[in-house]
Image (cartoon, rainbow, N blue to C red):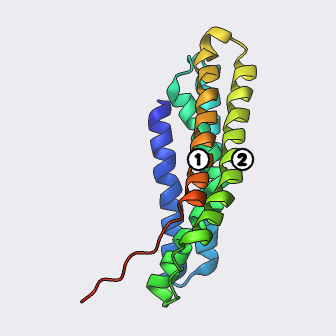
Amino acid sequence: MILAAIIACEVGFWAAIVGGLVTRYVFGRPRLGAMLLLAAPLIDLVLLVLVAVDMLRGGTASWHHGLAALYIGVSVAYGHRMIAWADAKFATRFRGAAPRPRRYGAAYAVACWKDVPRTVLAASIAAAVLGGLILFVGDADRTSELVGFLPILGVIVGIDLLWAISYSVWPKRPPVAAAG
């Protein structure tokens, strides 16, 4: 049930974003579009409630519950950035706005380093959700899978940190212009 809820919430998240942007740019209704965009964070709340209800009804935690916590953390930490990215794409497509410039070299490395605190925030939120569920349920046997998910959050932060380090040492190069 939780895996289906995660999938439904992810689809709902992007449906709210795309719906809001289509409403804003295609139909010229910016206020209605903004209201649809505001629905995206509510979807995270729905998922959190579904996970808590599942656990309260006697469900045993699985990796799906850990994934739900991670989804909520990433959505909160990166949600605004994802919406801004999609908004820029729509503005380029439907309003003729200039596309965002691609980053290379030091600018790309700086962008990678700016993501590290976001990833730490996402992992911290996920850890707080997991910890809250563990305390809320109060049954170590039913929540042991949640405790086992905590090291995965550390691995995710470590990978993002290595990503930033790697682009600091080996900067991303711009594509070579095609001769011809």
The image quarter in which residue 151 lies: top right
Q: Residue at x 65, y 44 (%)?
A: 73
Seen in the picture, residue 15 relative to 5 is either above or below; the reply is below
Q: Picture coordinates of residue 69 (x, y %)?
A: 61, 36
Q: CA distance from mark 1 to mark 2?
A: 17 Å
Task: Out of 108 and 59, give the one closest to the viewer.
Answer: 108
Task: Out of 149 and 136, give the one closest to the viewer.
Answer: 149
Count of number-bearing discs: 2
Mark 1 surroundings: few (<14), some (14-19) or many (≥20) residues within 10 A:
some
Query: Badge 2 is on which residue?
Result: 121
Q: Residue at x 49, y 49 (%)?
A: 10
Look at the numbered disc 2 and give the secondary structure of its residue. helix
> Label 1 sits on what residue type?
Leu
Q: Picture coordinates of residue 71 (x, y %)?
A: 57, 43
Seen in the picture, residue 60 relative to 171 is either above or below; the reply is above
Does residue 144 show up? yes
Seen in the picture, residue 151 relative to 114 is either above or below; the reply is above
Q: Picture coordinates of residue 58 (x, y %)?
A: 59, 15
Does residue 38 show up? no
Of all residues shown, which one is farthest toward the front?
Answer: 169
Of all residues shown, which one is farthest toward the top?
Answer: 141
* Mark sitting earlier along the chain (1/2): 2
Task: Out of 177 and 5, give the one closest to the viewer.
Answer: 177
- Disc assigned to residue 162: 1
Look at the numbered disc 1 and give the secondary structure of its residue. helix
Q: Residue at x 65, y 48 (%)?
A: 119
> Label 2 sits on what residue type?
Leu
Q: Picture coordinates of residue 126 (x, y %)?
A: 66, 37
The image quarter in which residue 55 lies: top right
Q: Mark 1, mark 2: which one is toward the viewer?
A: 1
Q: Residue at x 48, y 75 (%)?
A: 22
